[in-house]
Image (cartoon, grey):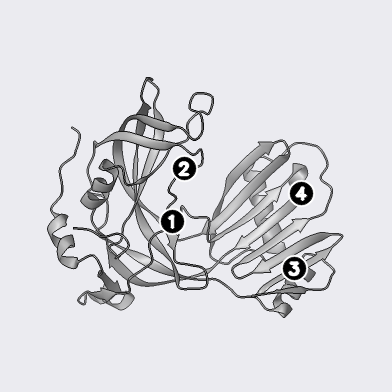
Amino acid sequence: MAMTTRMNRRGFAALIGAGALVARSATAQTTGSDSETGTELPAADLPSMNEQGHRFELSSTFDGNFDSVPAEAPVYKMELPVYTVEQVTEIAGRLEIEGDVSDLGGGTFSVQSRSGQLYVTQGRVQYISSAEVEDGDLPADEAAIASGREWLRQHNLLPGDVGDGTILTRSESPKRIIVGFQPIKPKPLISSTPMVTVSMGPGSVVVEATNGWAKLTQDVVYQLRGADFAWDEVESRRAWVDAKLPTDTFEPGTTIGGSVVYTQLSLAYTTSGIPGENQYLQPVYVFHGELTPDGTDSRYQVKAYVAALINSNQPVG
């Protein structure tokens, strides 16, 4: 039976207020001490449109329950590293890029030579190889992940808290496979930061690598706004909806109507905050379902994302 009713968390969340965040420190979490008002966080970074540029006008129902979704979740503070000229020189040496470090100002540097290029700024190290890539077959997924990890380890670009790698992209023209590595926790992480990526050609030859890592610190556990509020956002078409549809049937940039039946709700994490200021990884609700576009009997996997924290940028009540 489709679930469209509101849950009893509304009254409690309304008492919290739009501008307050109820949090527990790491000590309170283990000792069971009382809650306190936590830092008001920036809004979660969620796109306003999917990769194909589709806009969705969907009728949504939820056929499931919210029992497995926690009432609170930790927030992680994210600290992007700032590099010095000496550190950039050392990184260039490990990558065998022999050249002078150019200080571009604002903590940004570049090094260029015949063997490759290096660009460094706060929280980001990008390497571009000048090596010729011969024709051949791309490595299999597992081999590519293993090769990418080993290359990063050898060049001291592999963070200590990195998790399992995944294949982000595989293309045939040009022949490239891109492997991504994200932190062990929190997960799943839907943002592209923190992440380390390695782009390889045939023979697992590395053509580009980017280290966009950050130091993560868990300090507080925040009360979530409640799954019923999140469902209000989805039902009212205020959530970010993501679905990959065949472009030969659904032209990119068009409006897609239809119906969705969501059957599952989980939590994921994304970034929040402006670079140069305090930045965080904070939880978001993820609704999982199937989309049936108007005029078809076909069904496609769809996800809807809603910020999970109560703050002044996402008022409730």
On the image, the x and y values in percent for residue 24 come to 27, 73
Whether 64 is drawn above or below 18: the answer is above
Q: For marks 4 and 3, give the one nearer the viewer.
A: 3
Residue at 79% across / 36% down in the picture? 136
Badge 2 is on which residue? 50
Badge 3 is on which residue? 110
Q: Helix or strand or loop: what does disc 1 sit on?
A: loop
| Label number found at residue 187 | 1
| Label number found at residue 21 | none
- Residue 26 lies in quadrant: bottom left
| Label 4 – label 3 distance at C-alpha | 23 Å
Q: Helix or strand or loop: what does disc 4 sit on?
A: loop
Q: Helix or strand or loop: what does disc 3 sit on?
A: strand
Position of residue 2 in the picture relative to residue 113 (left or right) = left
Given residues 41 and 98, the one toward you in this image is 41
| Label 4 – label 1 distance at C-alpha | 29 Å
Q: Earlier in the sequence, mark 3 or mark 2?
A: 2
| Label 2 – label 1 distance at C-alpha | 21 Å
- Residue 283 lies in quadrant: bottom left
Q: For marks 2 and 4, give the one nearer the viewer.
A: 2
| Label 1 – label 3 distance at C-alpha | 33 Å
Position of residue 255 in the picture relative to residue 133 (left or right) = left
Badge 4 is on which residue? 205
Identify the amino acid type marked 3: Ser
Q: Quadrant of the N terminus?
A: top left
On the image, the x and y values in percent for residue 57 come to 34, 35
Whether 264 is drawn above or below 117: the answer is above
Crowdedness near tag 4: few (<14), some (14–19) or many (≥20) residues, C-alpha within 10 Å: many
